[in-house]
Image (cartoon, rainbow, N blue to C red):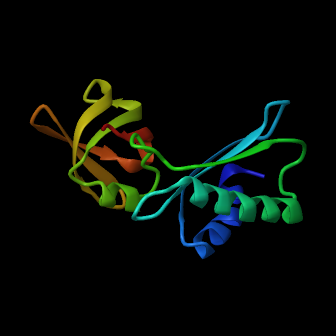
Amino acid sequence: MTRDELAKLLQPAVERLGYELSDLEAKTAGPNGFIRIFIDKPDGIGLSDCEKVSSAVSALLDVEDPVPGNYNLEVSSPGSDRKLTKHAHFVRFTGEAVKVQMRFPIENRRRFRGKLLAADEQNIVVEVDGVPHTLRVAHIDIARLAP
């Protein structure tokens, strides 16, 4: 099962509990497999939130059994240097400091660190040293908040 398929399976259960599935990482091959879920809500995430989601997701994974073999399930908050993985994340954090690494060089650089000025479905605009750079969302390797 791919990461996206796993996210589609788990997202409704997480949302029913009142949380956003902010991100998901999975490594299910080999002896040290894991499924790592990052959840969020407007007033932040605490330990009891992680426990509640872990219990529900664990039960769902036991019933659906989408991943062969053994793995550890981890549920966490996205943290202060959270990944920005969805259009809604870029919109929500417009005005904040971000670090963006591109898959391909743009203007002879792959890394951009600055203020997120704008975001739409196709592009984000990051101001670096007073200069705005328009970056294609489809070409972003990783984007994070830079607290």
Viewer-closest of 14 and 127 = 14
The x, y position of residue 130, in whole percent, is 9, 36
Q: Is 46 placed left or right of 43 in the picture?
A: right
Residue 103 is situated, as x and y percent measured from the top left of the image, at 44, 33
Query: Is residue 1 left or right of 118 when viewed as pictured?
Result: right
Residue, x 40% and y 63% (percent of image)?
43
In this rendering, the answer to whether 12 lies above or below 104 is: below
Residue 20 % position (x, y): 52, 64
Residue lying farthest bottom? 16
Give the total number of marks visible in the rendering. Answer: 0
Q: Is residue 103 left or right of residue 10?
A: left
Vertical placement of residue 29 versus 121, above or below: above
Residue located at (79% from left, 40% from top)? 28
Q: Please name the residue shown 83% across and 56% down the image.
A: 66
Seen as rendered, the residue at the extreme right is 69
In the image shown, does 85 or 105 lie closer to the viewer?
85
